[in-house]
Amino acid sequence: MVTDLQKNEEHVLNLKINDKHYEWHQQYITGAEVRKLGDIPQEDEIFLKIKKPWEDELVTNETTVDLARPGIEHFFSKMKFPITIIVNGTQKQWNEEKISYEQVVKLAFPNDVENSRTAYTVTYDKGPKQNPEGTMIKGDVVYVKNKMRFNVTATNQS
C-alpha cells in the first residue's frame, strides 16, 4: 500500500546525519540511502539515536526507517573496531578512533627503549577527512581509519 506521503514528492521530511541537517522526499529511508546521503564509509556502522532509557538502534544498509514519525530522526556513524592500520608495512589491529605519536612509535619499534639520542620521524597517509596525510611530532594525536598507513623511521642523534 502506497501512502499519500510516499506519493507526495513535494512533502519534505527532515533528518540529521552526524549532526548535519538533510531533507528527504519520501516517508522511508534505508540505511544504504543514509550512508550515501551522509557520505559515510562502508566500514562505519550507522545508528539511529533513541531516547533514553532505550539503546540506540543499529541501522544496516537493508534497514528501513520511517521518517514520518513525530520529531526529527537523528542518525550517527561510528567506526567499527578493531580496524587495521599499517605501520612500516605491517598490519596492526587498533581499537580506538585516535592514535598518538608515542603509540605509533611503540607499534613500529616495540623493543626500543626510550632515550634522548633516538629521534623518530612519523608520516602518515590514507587518513580520514580530519587528517588525510601529514607528519606527527611528539605529543600529536590523529584520527585513524581502516587501512591508514604510518611510516616511522628512527635516527640516532650524535
Image: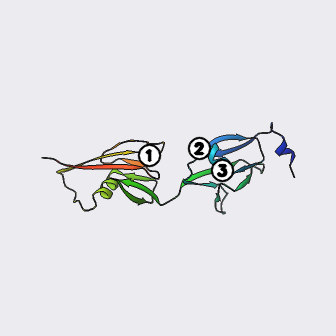
Q: Nearer the viewer, residue 54 or 137?
A: 137
Q: Residue at x 36, y 49 (%)?
A: 150
Work out whether residue 52 or residue 26 is closer to the camera in this orientation and state it: 26
Question: Distance of mark 1 from mark 2, alpha carbons?
Answer: 16 Å
Q: Is residue 91 left or right of residue 30?
A: left
Q: Which mark is residue 127?
A: 1
Residue type at mark 2: give it: Asp
| Drawn side of residue 70 relative to residue 93, left or right | right
Question: Is 56 on the left-hand or right-hand side of 126?
Answer: right
Question: Going by the picture, which residue comes out furthest to the top?
Answer: 10
Circle 3: residue type: Ala
Q: Is residue 76 left or right of residue 14?
A: left
Q: Which residue is mark 3?
A: 32
Q: How is the image coloured?
A: rainbow
- Which residue in the structure is indicated by mark 2? 39
**Foreground residue among 30 and 130:** 30
Residue in front for this viewpoint, 140 or 38: 38
Tell me the amino acid under the disc marked 1.
Answer: Gly
Q: Position of residue 128 (x, y in %)?
A: 47, 45
Q: Position of residue 70 (x, y in %)?
A: 77, 50
Asked which secondary structure carries label 1, the reply is loop
Q: Could you tell me which residue is drawn at 39 percent across and 58 percent down?
A: 91
| CA gap, disc 1 and disc 3 | 23 Å
Q: Earlier in the sequence, mark 3 or mark 2?
A: 3
Q: Earlier in the sequence, mark 1 or mark 2?
A: 2
Q: Residue at x 35, y 47 (%)?
A: 140
Q: Pinpoint residue 145: horizontal percent, then vertical percent.
A: 46, 51
Q: CA distance from mark 3 to mark 2?
A: 10 Å
Determine whether the residue tagged by mark 2 lies in a helix, strand or loop. Answer: loop
